[in-house]
Image (cartoon, rainbow, N blue to C red):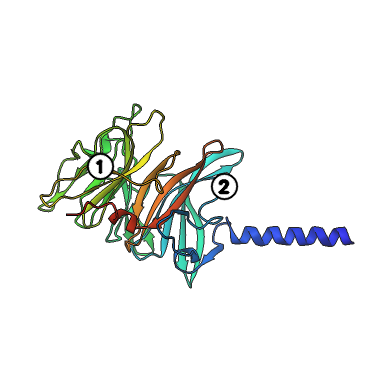
Amino acid sequence: MKRLSTWFVVLFAALVTYSEGYAQDGTAVAQGPYFGQKPPGLIPEAFAPGVVSTQGWEISGVFSPDMKEFYLIREVEVAGNLEQQFIVFEYNNNAWTENVISTRVGQPFIAPDGKTMHLGKRYKERIEGGWSEIKSLGSPFEELRIMRLTSSASGTYVFDEATQDGNGLLRYSRLVGGAREAPQPLPEVINTGRWNAHPFIAPDESYILWDGQRNSPVRNADLFVSFRQPDGSWGEAIKMGDEINTEESESGARVTPDGKYLFFNRMVERATDNIDIYWVDAKVIENLRPKP
């Protein structure tokens, strides 16, 4: 009887732990804004451990502008095979619930006006009750291997190009007179080095974040920032500090719609392919802005 009671206690504790962490579809997994997490300072921390950041592989966590949806890509084991799933956490009645949308369809980014979800060279439009079917941006975007596309409040696209040799360009495309201009490469101060990818343009276009490899003997991505200059040009690439960039890889930087926090992906353990989503106070960006 004593052994049976002990086994029951252990089983109950395990069930409680599971319910507070990675949960099945539709199950409430956390409460409060930002999943009830204590805001970080200037030292990055894993975001929502056990709920968002697990022992597996998670990337591309982004909030909707109203902060009531959080999208990410997670790798899970399904029927003995690894599968990358498109996940959404939704915030209602002070609680977050998790659902699987589909298998991976691109790296999500929601435009500042909340009306468009970009998925690389594809997108969805906000409709009553959710999102439209996936649509194509069409030519010339369709011909490019875009991993991630972000947009500013004025509609400027900034996006990458996936290549086998790491020499793809970061490009931009503006709305001029209501018409979309042809993509153009960003300047050499940004397109230097190799494996430049996953850009993020600030809503006001005052800076661009991205990851790439420069002056490193091994392939490990670091995060960089370039600030818009008074004459409209882009300033020299600034490598973010040692608190952000480690000996492993950091990638996919993005800032929350309220401007408070910088989110990014960090390789936590290469042997197990454990990538987590980290967050840090967005002041780390302004602290790098050159003083006049």
For the point 55% across and 39% down, the residue is 82
Image point (47%, 52%), residue name? 87
| Dot 2: element | loop
**How many residues crowd mark 1 within 10 Å: few (<14), some (14–19), many (20+)?**
some
Q: Amino acid type of disc 1?
A: Ala
Mark-to-mark CA distance, 2 and 1 = 33 Å
**Is residue 253 toward the left or the right of residue 140 in the image?**
right
* Residue 118 spot, x, y in % from top left: 32, 50
Please provide percent x and percent y for residue 251. Answer: 39, 43
In the image, which is nearer the foreground, mark 2 or mark 1? Answer: 1
Q: Residue at x 25, y 39 (%)?
A: 170
Q: Quadrant of the N terminus?
A: bottom right
Residue 106: in sight, yes or no?
Answer: no
Neighbor class of circle 2 (other Cα within 10 Å; few <14, some 14-19, many 20+) is some
**What residue does disc 1 label?**
237
Q: Secondary structure at mark 1?
A: loop
User: Which label number is shown at residue 55?
Assistant: 2
